[in-house]
Amino acid sequence: MTQVKLNVEGMSCNHCVNAVEKAVKNAGGNAKVDLASKTVEVEFDENKATLKAIKDAIEDQGYDVV
């Protein structure tokens, strides 16, 4: 399993947390969102998902991965 920490701008509430976690799950990973630090810890299997697909899924929800 691969683990990365992403900085994500635009998250401000529990709805944001749920949207990001669901997007990452749909892209093939698991996410833990920290609103205070505006970070998302992502874990995924490189045989089943790509980091680009996960970033794209987050951005499709209206957030910026920086």
Image (cartoon, rainbow, N blue to C red):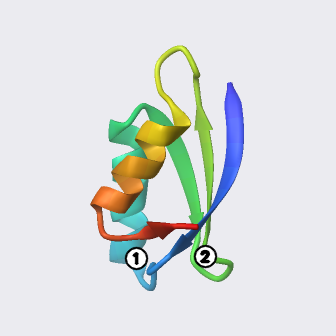
Decide: few, some or many residues near mark 1? Use Cα within 10 Å; few <14, some 14-19, many ≥20. Answer: few
Q: Nearer the viewer, mark 1 or mark 2?
A: 2
User: Is 21 placed left or right of 4 in the picture?
Assistant: left
Q: Residue at x 58, y 23 (%)?
A: 45
2 or 22: nearer the eye?
A: 2
Q: Residue at x 45, y 70 (%)?
A: 64
Percent coordinates x, y for residue 32 in the rendering: 58, 56
User: Is 17 placed left or right of 30 in the picture?
Assistant: left
Q: Amino acid at mark 1?
A: Asn
Percent coordinates x, y for residue 1 in the rendering: 68, 24
User: Is 45 placed left or right of 5 in the picture?
Assistant: left
The numbered disc on residue 41 is none
Label 2's element? loop
Q: Residue at x 54, y 14 (%)?
A: 47
Compared to residue 9, the image places residue 48 above or below, namely above
Sequence order check, earlier mark of 1 and 2: 1
Decide: few, some or many residues near mark 2? Use Cα within 10 Å; few <14, some 14-19, many ≥20. Answer: some
**Dots 1, 2 in contact, CB < 8 A:** no
Q: Quadrant of residue 25?
A: top left
Q: Quadrant of residue 59?
A: bottom left
User: Is 63 placed left or right of 45 in the picture?
Assistant: left
The numbered disc on residue 38 is 2
Compared to residue 4, the image places residue 7 above or below, namely below
Q: Residue at x 40, y 76 (%)?
A: 14
How many labels, in total? Answer: 2
Q: Quadrant of the C terminus?
A: bottom right
Separation of residues labelled 1 and 2 (CA atoms): 13 Å
In the rendered image, the residue lying farthest to the top is 47
The numbered disc on residue 14 is 1
Percent coordinates x, y for residue 61 in the rendering: 29, 63
Q: Amino acid at mark 2?
A: Lys
